[in-house]
Image: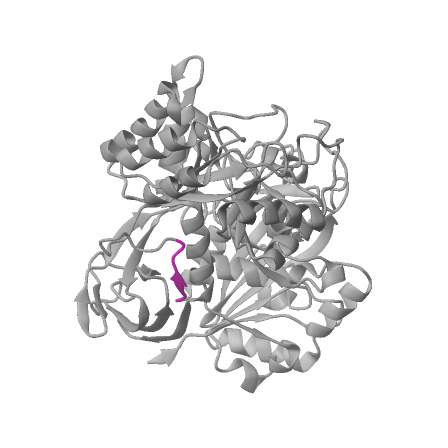
């Protein structure tokens, strides 16, 4: 048995120097990318780039590095380590061209400012990349919100192709892979950390970019002019995961187990805003409870400082199992475009706490208002909240994109917010949960129109996504909205999709618990994988690993556990549920050449 360890190089001095210049140090976000796909990894400095320092590692991930950063000894050590069996991953890394098998010949810069795309990529490898997309989406291009290198790589396997801002084939590779001795080298033509940070967190909102007259998360969208119909950032992460999995990596799955301990296909979370109404919350929550579904209501002050919902209604919602939170209001009674402040946030929160006496967990702002970049997340974390569900699914216009599933911020999953250069680019203990499905399945004055709903559920199952089902309480008192919810359950049943149902607060808590969980040790041997796992989530967590046969044997703490194997995206993936606490999980495969873990 040998330990399987992955490392990400982050140079603290380069980080400090960038911040001192007032610049964000974009390579930091690679740490977030790896955490979101569930890869256990350590962060190392340049002093580890030696024969002895690299010896314990199985995977090394390098960010963009300044010209001349690596000396001859480090280059030689990295090359020898790859030859001996390591996987080297480079995000626009220069100085190791011979190892990666690439030659840099040019570059594409941002089309406008640093939050616009430079170009895009298409996933083309028939085994590892193309199957990540449903057949009807395989012509899709994924925007790159970072500068992109133009290279030749005649001896490499081309996983993704570079395209111009207008999707013209350049033709150049965007992601390459090649075998090097016993190991392999994978090179990305752009900094994946920078791309996904800008895509998933969006641009700072200091002015009304889209012209709707207000400052909203729609102004933050950097995937324009692409449609957002598919989760571009998640697809890039899935490609990264596939390459790492081929080298033997193990992942903490994005979804926790079902209540019965089995593995879900998707996670649906339900919530909506009451818009200051007084007579819709209870009928909506009762309807959801009667169907056995969770629900989350954001309670708005109308006018600001006044809560129309009585305390007894608040308590009845609790009895129905309905989550309750604050709906911050910076739309009414202000002059637009309005930049709200921390003091305004605190005042509305104080009013909510005075009315109901319970700290909210995850919020939504009225009309998805926003100000700046990371500031609201920092303020809310300081005030005691854990997350928001505020990043909209579709850009403006229209003003209210109902019955639409989309991924304007490139992802379906929650993400931690990272602060700006003035605050050291620290990771804020606060998650942003994107809206992906907004009033899907019906049109209020026409009735049930389920095509977008069906698409949301199919995509959630295809990619094992967390899927937002955002329904305002008022519409759950009317038949079209109720019909859409019933159709959700019916379609899941007809399609055989096993969906874990949550309120938005519970998803927020799960993501924090997942972040605190750990694959503390991963060991590999012929036909055997052993993982030491720790999680405090009551239902436990799920391990995800690439396998070569359909019936591996799984055990947890010496007891046999059913291991789910799915043929997904051109490969066999095994999912092993692990209970809460600390556990030792094992996966065994037959030794028949192709049947090793």
Q: Which of the pair 104/348 is nearer the observer?
A: 348
- Which residue ends up furthest to the bottom in the rendered image? 52
Please indicate, yes or no, whether residue 203 appears anywhere in the rendered image: yes
Q: Which of the pair 114/457 is nearer the observer?
A: 457
x and y percentages locating residue 101 in the rendered image: 59, 62
Residue at 67% x, 37% y: name it.
165
- Which residue ends up furthest to the top in the rendered image? 446
Q: Which of the pair 104/544 is nearer the observer?
A: 544
Quadrant (top left, top right, bottom left, bottom right) of the N terminus: bottom left
Residue at 62% x, 35% y: name it.
167
Q: Which of the pair 268/109 is nearer the observer?
A: 268
Residue 544 magenta: no
Residue at 64% x, 38% y: name it.
369
Residue 252 magenta: yes
Picture quadrant where residue 8 is located: bottom right
x and y percentages locating residue 590 in the rendered image: 20, 67
Tell me: 500 left or right of 559: right
Residue at 28% x, 33% y: name it.
489
Please indicate, yes or no, whether residue 410 appears anywhere in the rendered image: no
- Which residue ends up furthest to the left in the rendered image? 560
x and y percentages locating residue 193 in the rendered image: 61, 57
Quadrant (top left, top right, bottom left, bottom right) of the C terminus: bottom left
Picture quadrant where residue 579 is located: bottom left
x and y percentages locating residue 408 in the rendered image: 57, 37
Q: Give the range drawn in magenta.
A: 248-254
Tell me: 553 left or right of 538: left
């Amino acid at each position: 048995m040998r330990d399987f360890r992955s490392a990400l190089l982050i140079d603290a001095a380069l980080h400090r120097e960038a911040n001192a210049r007032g610049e964000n140090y974009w390579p930091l976000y690679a740490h977030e990318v790896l955490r979101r796909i569930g890869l256990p990894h350590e962060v190392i400095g340049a002093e580890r780039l030696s024969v002895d320092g690299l010896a314990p590692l199985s995977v090394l991930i390098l960010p963009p590095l300044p010209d001349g950063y690596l000396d001859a000894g480090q280059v030689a050590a990295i090359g020898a380590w790859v030859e001996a069996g390591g996987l080297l991953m480079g995000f626009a890394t220069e100085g190791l061209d011979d190892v990666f098998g690439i030659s840099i010949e040019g570059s594409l810069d941002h089309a406008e400012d640093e939050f616009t795309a430079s170009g895009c990529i298409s996933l083309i490898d028939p085994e590892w990349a193309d199957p990540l997309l449903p057949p009807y989406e395989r012509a899709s291009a994924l925007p790159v919100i970072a500068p992109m290198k133009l290279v030749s790589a005649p001896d490499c396997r081309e996983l993704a192709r570079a395209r111009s801002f207008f999707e013209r084939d350049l033709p150049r590779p965007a992601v390459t892979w090649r075998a090097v001795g016993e190991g392999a080298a994978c090179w990305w033509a752009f900094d994946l950390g920078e791309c996904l940070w800008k895509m998933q967190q969006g641009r700072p909102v200091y002015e009304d970019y889209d012209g709707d007259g207000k400052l909203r998360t729609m102004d933050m969208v950097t995937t324009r002019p692409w449609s957002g119909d598919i989760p571009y950032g998640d697809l890039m992460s899935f490609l990264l995961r596939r390459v790492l999995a081929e080298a033997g990596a193990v992942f903490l799955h994005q979804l926790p187990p079902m209540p019965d301990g089995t593995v879900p296909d998707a996670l649906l979370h339900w919530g909506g805003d009451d818009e200051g109404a007084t007579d819709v919350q209870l009928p909506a929550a009762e309807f959801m409870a009667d169907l056995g579904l969770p629900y989350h209501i954001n309670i708005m002050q109308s006018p600001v400082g006044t809560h129309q919902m009585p305390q007894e209604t608040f308590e009845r919602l609790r009895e129905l199992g309905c989550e309750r939170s604050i709906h911050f209001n910076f739309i009414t009674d202000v002059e637009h475009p309005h930049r709200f402040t921390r003091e305004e946030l605190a005042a509305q929160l104080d009013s909510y706490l005075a009315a109901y006496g319970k700290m909210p967990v995850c919020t939504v702002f009225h009309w998805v208002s926003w100000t700046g970049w990371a500031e609201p997340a920092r303020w809310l974390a300081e005030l005691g909240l854990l997350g928001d569900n505020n990043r909209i699914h579709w850009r403006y216009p229209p003003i209210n994109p109902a019955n639409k599933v989309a991924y304007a911020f490139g992802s379906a999953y929650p993400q931690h917010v990272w602060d700006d250069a003035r605050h050291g680019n620290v990771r804020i203990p606060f998650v942003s949960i994107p809206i992906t499905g907004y009033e899907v399945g019906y049109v209020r004055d026409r009735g049930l129109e389920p095509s977008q709903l069906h698409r949301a559920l199919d995509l959630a199952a295809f990619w094992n996504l967390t899927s937002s089902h955002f329904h305002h309480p008022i519409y759950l008192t009317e038949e079209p909205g109720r019909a859409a919810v019933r159709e959700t359950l019916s379609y899941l049943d007809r399609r055989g999709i096993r969906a874990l149902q949550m309120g938005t607060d519970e998803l927020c808590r799960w993501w924090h618990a997942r972040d605190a969980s750990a694959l503390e040790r991963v060991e590999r041997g012929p036909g055997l994988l052993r993982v030491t796992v720790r999680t405090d989530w009551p239902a436990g967590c799920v391990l995800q690993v690439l396998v070569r046969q359909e019936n591996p044997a799984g055990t947890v703490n010496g007891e046999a556990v059913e291991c789910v194997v799915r043929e997904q995206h051109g490969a066999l993936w095994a999912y092993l549920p692990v209970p809460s606490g600390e556990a030792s999980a094992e996966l065994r495969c037959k030794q028949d050449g192709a049947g090793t873990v």
